[in-house]
Image (tube, rainbow, N blue to C red):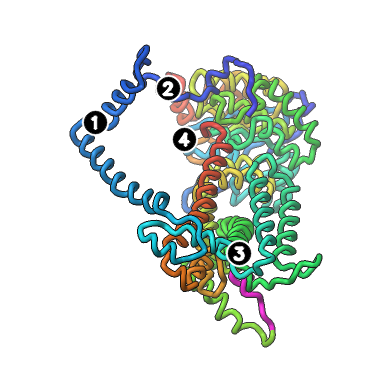
Amino acid sequence: MARHPESPDEIYAREEEPDEGWRRPPPVEGASLRAVVGEWSRKNLFSSIPNTILTVLCAWLLWETLLPLTQWGLLDAVWQTDDSAVCRAAEHGACWAFIANKYRFILFGLFPYDEQWRPLVAIALFVAALAVSCVPSFWRPWLVVLWLGVMVACGVLMWGGVFGLRFVENGRWGGLPLTLILAVVGIVCSFPLAIALALGRRSNLPAVRAICVGFIEFVRGVPLISVLFMASVMFPLFLPEGFTIDKLLRAQVGIILFTAAYLAEAVRGGLQAVPRGQSEAADALGLSYWRKTGLVILPQALKTSIPAIVNQFISMFKDTSLVIIIGLFDLLSTAKAALSDPPWRPFYVEAYLFAALIYWIFCFFMSRYSQFIERRFETGHRRS
Amino acid sequence: MPATLNRTPDAQVAITLDGVHKWYGAFHVLNDINLTVHAGERIVVCGPSGSGKSTMIRCINALEQHQQGHIVVDGVELTNDVRTVDRIRRNVGMVFQQFNLFPHLTVLDNLTLAPVWVQKRPKAEAVQTAMKYLERVNIPEQAGKYPGQLSGGQQQRVAIARALCMKPQIMLFDEPTSALDPEMIKEVLDVMIELAEGGMTMICVTHEMGFARTVANQMVFMDGGAIVEKAPPETFFTAPKSDRTQQFLSQILTH
């Protein structure tokens, strides 16, 4: 927000900064580091008998867990070998060599080995487009164009068949690109659908309301697994002979519909939190329903529901791993499949840790980003 | 601004309420309301809470729907048709007790939103108009701030400027100072008095009797959903006809 010169009105405007200065003791001249540390720990760790007991207990727990973990994960770990026997010999160490040997399979699945630069470039494009989309001042119409471009480029890279690229059917896609496609396309498509459903649920038109309520309540009542299963097994039974819809597409649609139903409820919560007066003020100014909704109500509703929305996206990101039950190889499935190579079979902990780390990086990013966005759209205390 | 500085009560009729009734379920909120407002007139509506004052003025710009009777604003009869509702809302500005500024937009964006999207005016022109009205309500320096950063009095002045940016013929005020701290009431009333002096047609629900005495051409006292007394302020304050009005005035004027 723009800063303005100090004026008498600034007195109202200034947000009160919590002044914590009084809590801190005055700095002691020439205090040694040792004295400072001693002072700090006396105050925070050993201030009372129960506190001291807890401190000792925590220290013991950390010692008991972190030490063996470091031993296993770093000190005794085998980092580089092509021979699984070396790993088996190092009984008490992690076998990161397994990841070193299998990371390409885990990341890219059954995608032809020589062509795996294609999914890599696709992921890079995807992540770059995501990074650009994260900057609020770039939220302009050209961003949609950018995304369409990235989607086409990713499609060309993944499928191929043009520009001399070998055609790769999407049954061979797997690993991280598949997870990202399912998640990002899921997020991008379920979000507008969820907004439409949430608005529909509050509509004055009985038919619209009934359809939205029916859809939301039905989808929320069934587990994602059964939605995917129906999409994969039941749905083709109802299609006319010789007419098929791609399995990946069916799973994607299933995920979109499922997420949208949950998301719609998160958005509805935000809509309900917008005071009635906002809608009345927009009406009084003569704004039409869609302008009122788009310019006044939704921006406020979405802001309040950011935590719930991101919660849903994070949960959906991880739920994409359920596509394994219909035979799609997402990141978790490829990690699991990498273990089916007999010599490397014992190293499942390493495989799952590696997959977990990748999931965690994306989810942690989403979580931090949601906090950033919440702060970005904070516009002072709401008094009205 | 309307150029009608003609303040004779016989000027053109701005608003007519003719036998207006409204019920909330079995509760009769508005009971046979008849009121004529001429262009340039300032009507102050008072009465105990729950007497239907707010409901009445909210019926005029269709924030509430009346169930019986006729409401005609600037020659347009208010019906359920979206087009007539739109036409009337473009002519009628409204200021609310709770300000109802849009908290996610800056003051300037609050002021230009409707002119740009509803009246399709160019952004630059809308900004110019907005700054003009912000100057009139004495807070041009707050244009870049968000409503949440302003005091209540400032917010209400912004709300008045926002309504004025639509260049309405009529302004409705629904208890504009009731949510304000005492020291902020004056700054808002000053703006309203200036507006009245400029010849704006106003209907104002308020308990500020000093303000009423200064600006009103006509006082309207409501109780139990009906208009009990209608009189010019001189007679209204000194010689009210009905007992109920007397009682009400003695209640609020003794403090």
Q: Which residue is mark 4?
A: B49
Q: Foreground residue, B116 or A220? A: A220
Q: Which is nearer the N-term, disc 1 or disc 2?
A: 2
Which of the numbered marks, if any, corresponds to residue A108? Answer: 3
Q: Which residues are magenta?
A: A243-251
Q: Is A314 located above or below residue B215 in the figure?
A: below
Pinpoint the chain carrying mark 1: A
Of circles 1 and 4, which is in front?
A: 1
CA distance for labels 2 and 4: 43 Å
Tag 1 residue: A46
Estimate the x, y position of residue A77 in percent, counting from the top left. 42, 54
Q: Earlier in the sequence, mark 3 or mark 1?
A: 1
Separation of marks 4 and 3 at Cα, in angstroms: 70 Å
Disc 3 chain ID = A
Q: Which mark is residue A19?
A: 2
User: x and y percent of residue B73 in the render?
Assistant: 71, 41
